[in-house]
Image (cartoon, coloured by chain):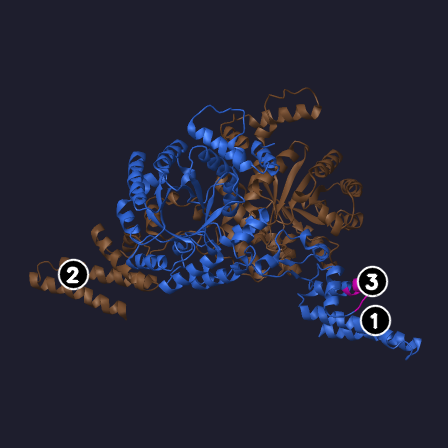
Chain colours: A blue, B brown
Amino acid sequence: MCGSCEDAKANAGLPANKEEVFQQVIEAKKKGGPINPYGPNPADYLSNVSNFQLIESTLREGEQFANAFFTTEKKIEIAKALDDFGVDYIELTSPVASEQSRADCEAICKLGLKAKILTHIRCHMDDARVAVETGVDGVDVVIGTSQFLRQYSHGKDMNYIAKSAIEVIEFVKSKGIEIRFSSEDSFRSDIVDLLNIYRTVDKIGVNRVGIADTVGCANPRQVYDLVRTLKSVVHCDIETHFHNDTGCAIANAYTALEAGARLIDVSVLGIGERNGITPLGGLMARMIAADRDYVLSKYKLHKLRDLENLVADAVQVNIPFNNPITGFCAFTHKAGIHAKAILANPSTYEILNPSDFGLSRYIHFANRLTGWNAIKSRVDQLNLHLTDDQCKDVTAKIKRLGDVRQLSIDDVDSIIRDFHAEVSTPLVRPSEGSALEEDVSINEGPETKKQKIEN
Amino acid sequence: MCGSCEDAKANAGLPANKEEVFQQVIEAKKKGGPINPYGPNPADYLSNVSNFQLIESTLREGEQFANAFFTTEKKIEIAKALDDFGVDYIELTSPVASEQSRADCEAICKLGLKAKILTHIRCHMDDARVAVETGVDGVDVVIGTSQFLRQYSHGKDMNYIAKSAIEVIEFVKSKGIEIRFSSEDSFRSDIVDLLNIYRTVDKIGVNRVGIADTVGCANPRQVYDLVRTLKSVVHCDIETHFHNDTGCAIANAYTALEAGARLIDVSVLGIGERNGITPLGGLMARMIAADRDYVLSKYKLHKLRDLENLVADAVQVNIPFNNPITGFCAFTHKAGIHAKAILANPSTYEILNPSDFGLSRYIHFANRLTGWNAIKSRVDQLNLHLTDDQCKDVTAKIKRLGDVRQLSIDDVDSIIRDFHAEVSTPLVRPSEGSALEEDVSINEGPETKKQKIEN
């Protein structure tokens, strides 16, 4: 079995003072004093799954989405909505990107939001000097460290990178605002180069260091490994940024938290360069499955749908049909076996509770895969009364039609009502007609129904 | 550092005979003979990232998607397209779901496809007897093992489950076709119950056992742990099935392969119950990043887009804007710093090569985040000639307009052509006019351009 997984299991039973133990070990390590190599391992206490923060980057990474053009008014509307949702940080496009970018950054800083405002710049004094004058609460500095980026983007070596980083960090710190240093394309960078530069900037005293999967190549176990290793090298918080090219951006973010990262970069619907980054909504789905109380205490999940609609409209895209939480079918149950269990207890086939997001579930009963439990539930909704055996009979009729063509709810309701009329006719007038009449009435029913269906 | 990650790293440098070593250890284990507990660990040789198979379930799991109604003709069209793409197995809806489901299953079995045909049934003799008569190459049997499903779905205990499993498995085996036994909701099932039933069915001789994350709750490290543990208990192949409610279905599938699973259930666009399962295209993106040669040798990736369009049309959904590979912006690069590096070497910001999928990349240059390298590239495309400094000047003009409103490619091309006309005018008639005339021409240019833009 995987050592790290055993750790995770052991964590589940950790004493309440696990934070305390963790701090003791960390302090001992900081002091450089003797520590028992077989004693408690700080790595066992790393997980921030129940203690994470969001850096919301719709107005930075999201502006790099192909369709994005945000006016000042739209940026302010989005910033306010993000703040209301409860994100911890809002990251904005570099003020040197364009004159309007600078003005918008200043305008958003003046809104007095609860969320801290960051801007994202290249590791260069020209950018830093402009950034610190905008009124932001912090500056996110980034520089490419992979061989690819060093060769084809900025063309600098690691010594130059370290020198620039130190200059920019000390300058930003002198202004009394937060500073993050991140490498770019971290997962294709040399591990020794990375740890060297991170240790250097940690010693100067950055608020956090960032790991970025700029091309979306990382997989969860690589993420766990790198974050856990980095956690043993730096004392500051770790932020992570995952692109979604290979579909792992949510899982990588979660695994980074398990390994000790504290902050996750997200954007609404994941919009960003190419097919984007970890989506806010998808991460909420992942995190609420892990620690519902923590997520509900921090974020207004029932505003998620409005927030996604706001951004989707602004960048002219549709909410993907399979979007976590807000996709049109995220809480739709169809197969008969699923529907049956959901009706008995929704937790059987739902790890998320739709009401946490102000949404509701839907049992899809108008199809050939339906089962009699789903149909019985619909019969109840229609305020009709059929026995279980009768429900099974009408279900068989519905499945037969469902084999012929796509069914609408109206189709199913018609079949149910007809069937109900047939079987209940003798019951409502038991003494009015003869046995013969009853038989006739029963025989007539199906004919009538069949015609209706064929029409 | 994580032990499992160290294993993975060690694997990268394994000798060519790693398969051989693995087989030796496995054989020794099977024989029950003495094995050196400190010797090679089979777990170190588990990864099937370069040796996986696909069970394509668009016509089973996908039929449980809210919008799905497939006619016989459409099912056959999809099955042929999947077969042409190269999937290893095609899984079909249970023949007992409806009469047409049975007939369709028989029809697809008669197509003579290269892919093996499976059908998916409940662990019940009534279903098994029908399934084996359809002509399928194998039967996938499933039963709920979690407390939730045992209580609210079938209401049976583990002894009953084992008894039914043995009966069904021996019956299907007697017909000479493949048999898979899967638990349902595996990640919320008791681990001892699970390992017990898997060992039992493995001893009877199933072709593979399945793990299913039916509610989409699993995270990658849990997946790694469970698959790796199971791998030490059974000798048959392991199949995995991941729902995507919390956005981890691709990452979980990848991690399962790392832990020794061999087969992954997928569907086109991930369609299935709720928001679906591991999508075929997304998994291809993940796997090609891991082992391009293996993926290209097995699957016709250039047919992915047509396959997705076929299924999207059939179930009336749009391809999500952020879909891996085929989303409209998956290979679009926008920020100036990205565009510059992509132009120098696409690998700087691309882990996937669009041409592997018959697609092409696009440098988005018509926006305020653009950089002069992207504009220079456009200038070249337009067959115009500007110096680097001139490109920087025209880029500044483009960014200014990009601050005011969303730009089209035509806008940018107009600005470039105007600018080119201005700066090249003196050059094409150096001796024709006086210095004064040249000045006038230069001064006129910007005015003309400005008017055009304002119009």
Secondary structure of the residue carrying numbered label 2: helix
- Residue B285 on image: x %, y %: 50, 46
Quickly name the residue at label 2: B425
Which callout, 2 or 3, points to the residue nearer the camera? 3
What is the chain identity of the residue bearing mark 2?
A: B
Quickly name the residue at label 3: A389
| Dominant SS type (magenta) | helix
- Residue A152, located in which quarter of the rendered image? top left
- Residue B414, located in which quarter of the rendered image? bottom left
Please, what is the three-letter code of the amino acid marked with disc 1?
A: Val
Secondary structure of the residue carrying numbered label 1: helix
Secondary structure of the residue carrying numbered label 3: helix
- Residue B427, located in which quarter of the rendered image? bottom left
Q: Do the residues bearing badges 2 and 3 touch, measured as CB atoms within 8 Å? A: no
Comparing B135 with A182, the one in front is A182
Quickly name the residue at label 1: A423
Q: Do the residues bearing badges 1 and 2 touch, measured as CB atoms within 8 Å? A: no
Q: What stretch is highlighted in magenta?
A: A385-394
Q: Residue at 44% across / 63% down in the picture?
A: A316
Q: Do the residues bearing badges 1 and 3 touch, measured as CB atoms within 8 Å? A: no
What is the chain identity of the residue bearing mark 1?
A: A
User: What's the CA distance linking mark 1 and mark 3?
Assistant: 12 Å
